[in-house]
Image (cartoon, rainbow, N blue to C red):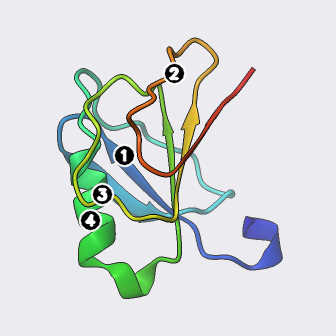
Amino acid sequence: MYKTGHKITVAQCDTKLNSVKEFNPRKDWEIHGRGGTSFQPVVDHFNENKGQYTALIYLTDGEAYSPEDCPNNTLWVLSSISDMNDELPGQVIKLN
């Protein structure tokens, strides 16, 4: 997506939003957070900045409660070791 000219914003979250930065493949990533998981802070950030984003792609283990007011254009990408969370709104895929 980045190579086709799309702007990608990466939000790092555990129980709170820890970092929101534009994706740059030429820079190293510093991981923020660890611990419990809540999807709500990222969904709230997306909803508060709707004009800035066109879709939400959430990379996760899926192990948290489903968020409220989740946008319809959300894609949940679960890790291969995840249990499927059938309550997540939007499209859900699991990596092999």
Q: Amino acid at mark 2?
A: Met
Q: Secondary structure at mark 4?
A: helix
Q: Secondary structure at mark 3?
A: helix
Where residue 3 appears, as percent x and y from the top left, is 81, 69
61 w.r.t. 2: above or below: above
Q: Earlier in the sequence, mark 1 or mark 3?
A: 1
Front position in the image: 43 or 22: 43
| Cα–Cα gap, marks 1 and 3 | 12 Å
| Side of 63 relative to 2 (left or right) | left
Do the numbered discs 2 and 3 sit on residues whose CB atoms are within 8 Å? no
Give the class, few, some or many, for how many residues have Cα within 10 Å of label 1's Cα (few <14, many ≥20): many
| Cα–Cα gap, marks 2 and 1 | 21 Å
Name the residue tied to disc 3.
43
Do the numbered discs 4 and 3 sit on residues whose CB atoms are within 8 Å? yes
Q: Amino acid at mark 3?
A: Val
Front position in the image: 55 or 24: 55
Give the class, few, some or many, for how many residues have Cα within 10 Å of label 4's Cα (few <14, many ≥20): few
Give the number of the mark in front: 2 or 1: 2
The image quadrant that residue 79 belongs to is top right
> In the image, what residue occupies the spot 60% across and 75% down?
7
41 w.r.t. 86: above or below: below
The image quadrant that residue 4 belongs to is bottom right
Name the residue tied to disc 4.
45
Q: Amino acid at mark 1?
A: Gln
